[in-house]
Image (cartoon, rainbow, N blue to C red):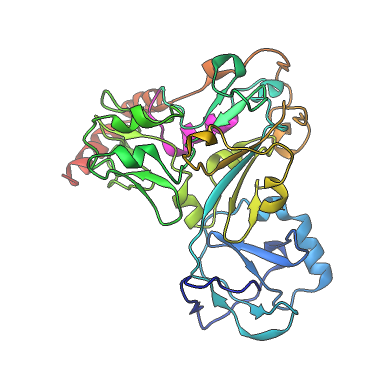
């Protein structure tokens, strides 16, 4: 195991009741050793898994990396660099350092599948994004957003800058860095001055001018700074890297929804990333020719990296892409952003017909 860096938090013992590792939960990492993705981290160990079981688990990596949230504690035997076991595993308390790598060789804006950008659509649905906002938006060269990148399409989430202008200018501390390096917004503290929007060089922040339309169950829920729900009038919102999903052992929605597997999320501490279909070494991804961060010359230190490309590896094959079989191909033209959905008004109308709105309104009153 890699040695703990000086000054990093000490490890604490895991639960005293270790459970067996299942073969289907195991995949082979880029270093050739077995890993399990659980609790928002990759855990190294074998726990009696045979070589046959390990190979079986590696073949099922696409499904094991798209896990539903599961318990955060992991059990196993910790091994030193020589492979010798030396007692019960201990759960690392090392703080994650989330990073995103987008392979533009695989991104065609979903035009070849004849559907709107699925990273954006999935984000809209899963995060209850208010209508008109695109927390991850797919740009094109002629729109002037990707000079120097050399691509036909560029998915742009919040860049999660480590020297974030938005954080620096917020007068009330509503925009802040989480320990993992992600930039979050506390809408209950936000005063709506929009200085952060003016400071962001990526145009990746959005303002709720009116009362955001969301399903009544969402509006009635207690506020959560990680999920930004319920949305609040007069405040700023943006991509949050789905930190709540990753903390529970899942993946950001844009990663799971991309039919081409173009979006990777990883941890700089562990040096491993995944697109939900395969695991990769971050060194492998970040040493590709021409890898860069958008507008990195501004000194913002973004945590989103791009592998240059023109969508040349985008395919209509594969399990995810096959879900769109039968739709007309659109090999020319831009992404179908005009077909994106924000279905909340329609959902609310249907719920009103069922009399659900009155029930949730009384629930919402209980949070006042």
Q: Is residue 351 magenta?
A: no
Q: Is residue 121 magenta?
A: yes
Q: Residue at x 27, y 47 (%)?
A: 222
- Which residue is at the front of the view, 137 or 174? 174
Q: In the picture, residue 362 is in which quadrant? A: top left
Residue 355 seen in this snapshot: no
Residue 135, how many percent across, how many down? 46, 32
- Which residue is at the front of the view, 253 or 81? 81
Where 228 falls versus 143 (above or below)?
below
State the quadrant of the C terminus.
Answer: top left
Residue 178 seen in this snapshot: yes
In this picture, residue 342 sits left or right of residue 74: left
Where 139 falls versus 299 (above or below)?
above
State the quadrant of the N terminus.
Answer: bottom right
- Which residue is at the front of the view, 159 or 360? 159
Q: Residue furthest bottom?
A: 87
Q: Which residues are magenta?
A: 118-131
Q: Main secondary structure of the magenta part?
A: helix
In this picture, residue 129 sits left or right of residue 71: left
Residue 233, how many percent across, how many down? 25, 30
Q: In the picture, residue 105 is in which quadrant? A: top right
In this picture, residue 145 sits left or right of residue 272: left
Q: Residue at x 73, y 42 (%)?
A: 288
Q: Residue at x 47, y 45 (%)?
A: 242
In this picture, residue 314 sits left or right of residue 13: right
Residue 185, how many percent across, how many down? 33, 42
Q: Residue furthest right?
A: 52
- Which residue is at the front of the view, 167 or 48? 167
Where 16 falls versus 295 (above or below)?
below
């Amino acid at each position: 195991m890699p040695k703990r860096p000086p000054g990093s938090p000490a490890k604490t013992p895991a639960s005293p009741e270790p459970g067996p590792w299942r073969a289907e939960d195991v995949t082979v990492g880029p270093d050739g050793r077995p890993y399990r993705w659980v609790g928002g981290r990759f855990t190294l160990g074998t726990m009696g898994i045979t070589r046959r079981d390990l190979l079986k688990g590696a073949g099922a990596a696409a499904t094991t990396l798209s896990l539903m949230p599961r318990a955060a504690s992991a059990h196993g035997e910790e091994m030193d660099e020589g492979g010798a076991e030396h007692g019960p595993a201990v759960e690392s308390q090392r703080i994650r350092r989330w990073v995103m790598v987008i392979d533009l060789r695989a991104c065609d804006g979903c035009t070849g599948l004849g559907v709107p950008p699925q990273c954006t659509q999935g984000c809209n649905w899963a995060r209850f994004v208010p209508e008109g906002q695109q927390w991850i938006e797919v740009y094109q060269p002629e729109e002037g957003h990707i000079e120097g990148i050399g691509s036909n399409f560029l998915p742009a989430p919040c860049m999660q800058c480590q020297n974030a202008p938005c954080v620096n200018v917020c007068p009330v501390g509503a925009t802040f860095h989480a320990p993992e390096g992600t930039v979050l917004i506390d809408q209950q503290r936000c005063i709506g001055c929009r200085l952060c929007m003016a400071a962001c060089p990526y145009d990746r922040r959005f303002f709720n001018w009116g009362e955001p339309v969301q399903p009544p169950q969402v509006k009635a829920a207690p506020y959560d700074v990680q999920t930004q729900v319920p949305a609040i009038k007069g405040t700023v919102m943006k991509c949050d890297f789905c930190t709540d999903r990753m903390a529970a052992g899942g993946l950001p929605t844009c990663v799971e929804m991309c039919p081409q597997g173009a979006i990777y999320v990883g941890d700089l501490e562990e040096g491993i990333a995944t697109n939900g279909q395969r695991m990769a070494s971050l060194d492998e991804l970040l040493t590709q020719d021409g890898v860069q961060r958008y507008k990195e010359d501004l000194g913002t230190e973004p945590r989103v990296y791009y592998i240059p490309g023109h969508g040349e590896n985008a395919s209509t094959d594969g399990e995810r892409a096959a879900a769109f079989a039968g739709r007309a191909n659109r090999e020319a033209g831009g992404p179908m952003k005009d077909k994106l959905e924000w279905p909340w008004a329609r959902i609310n109308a249907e719920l009103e017909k069922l009399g659900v709105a009155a029930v949730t309104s009384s629930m919402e009153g209980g949070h006042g």
